[in-house]
Amino acid sequence: MSMARLRLGCWFDDEGGTGAMTFPHPHAQPHPPPHPQQYPHPSPYPPPHPSAYPPPYPSAHPPPHPSAAHCEVCGALPATAVTVRAHQGMVVIMRTVTRRGVLCRTCGLAVYRQMTSDTLLTGWWGLFSFFVTPFVVLSNAFGARAALRRLPEPYGAVRPRLHPGRRVLRRAPAMLILTPVALVALAIPALLVVGLLSGGGGGSVALSAGDCVRNEADWPEQQLRKMDCGSPLAEYRVLDEASCGPGDHLLHAEYTIGAPGRPGSCVTPL
C-alpha cells in the first residue's frame, strides 16, 4: 500500500517522487467570469444600429410622432393616403389605372395633375369611356385633390420631390377638350336669343278661321301678321279647310298649330 509522507511543505510517495505542496490563501477570491463582450453568444440577428438607442440628453427638436405618415416619394411630412385614377378609352375596350399611396401635398398634386390630364386627353375614345371619363375626373378632383389641398406645406424631405407643374385647366388636354364644350354651352342660349329677336317682328301667331292678316313677304314666303278686318292694311282672310279653294294659299304649320277655336288652313284675298 502506497502512502505519502509530508515533510516541510513537500510530499513524498513510495516511488521516490517529490513535489511542492500549495495551500490556498485564506482571503483569496475566485477569478471573475469573462466579460460577455469578450465571448459574445452567437445570434442570428445583427446588432442594432447605434441610432436605435435613445440620445442621452433630450433634443431641442423632438422626432415626429411614430404614427405620422411620411411621403413615400420624398419622405416629407405631413402626408396622407390618396387614390388617383386615370382612364383610357380604346374604341372597343377601356382601361383604368389606379394609383394608391401616401403622398405629401407637393408630390400628390403632381400625380393628380398628370393622371387627370392624361384622362382628359385619352379618356373619350370609346362608347362607354365617353361616360366613364367625367366620373373619373370628378372623383380625382373631389377626392384626392381635396384631401391634398387640406395639407400644409411639406417639410423634412430626404429625397427629391415631384414637380406639380401647371394646373389641370391650364394644360393643353384640358383646353383641347373643355374649349369646344364651353362653346357649345354658350351657343345654345345665344341661338335662343337670336331666334327670339329674329321672330319677334314677323307677327307669327296661331290663326283661326275668320281672322284677317297681312303678308309682309312675297308669296310663297309667309310672314303673316294678324290685323283687324276693318283695317285698310288687312289683305287676306283665314278660312277653314272646308272653305279653301284652288286659288287660296295654304298656311304654314307654324300658323295652324295651337290656334284657338277652329284652326285655319288657308287664306283668301279680301
Image (spheres, grey):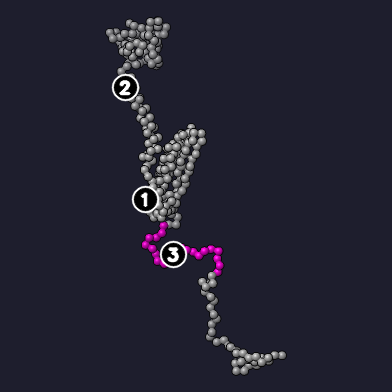
Residue shown at 47% from the left, 46% from the top: 100
Q: Which residue is painted at 36% across and 28% down in the image? A: 187
Q: Label 2, on which residue?
A: 197
Three-letter code, disc 1 = Glu
Place of residue 244 in the rendered image (x, y in percent of width and height, measured from the top left): 40, 6
Q: What residue do we see at 41% from left, 54% from top?
A: 159
Q: Residue furthest right?
A: 1
Marked residue nearer the N-terminal end (3 or 2): 3
Residue holding disc 3: 54
Where 189 falls versus 220 (above or below)?
Answer: below
Q: How far apart, in angstroms, are the residues tagged by discs 1 and 2?
A: 54 Å
Dots 1, 3 in contact, CB < 8 A: no
Foreground residue, 127 or 190? 127
Helix, strand, or loop for circle 2?
helix
Magenta residue span: 41-64
Residue 260 sits in quarter: top left
Q: Residues within 10 Å of mark 2 (few under 14, many from 20)?
A: few
- Amino acid type at mark 3: Pro
Residue 73, percent from left and from top = 43, 51
Residue 242 visible in image: yes
Image height check: is 158 above or below 270? below
**Residue at mark 1 to residue at mark 3: CA–CA distance:** 29 Å
Could you classify mark 1 by the number of other residues whose Cα lies within 10 Å: few (under 14), some (14-19), or many (20 or more)? Answer: few
Q: Work out which quarter of the rendered image holds the C terminus and state it.
A: top left
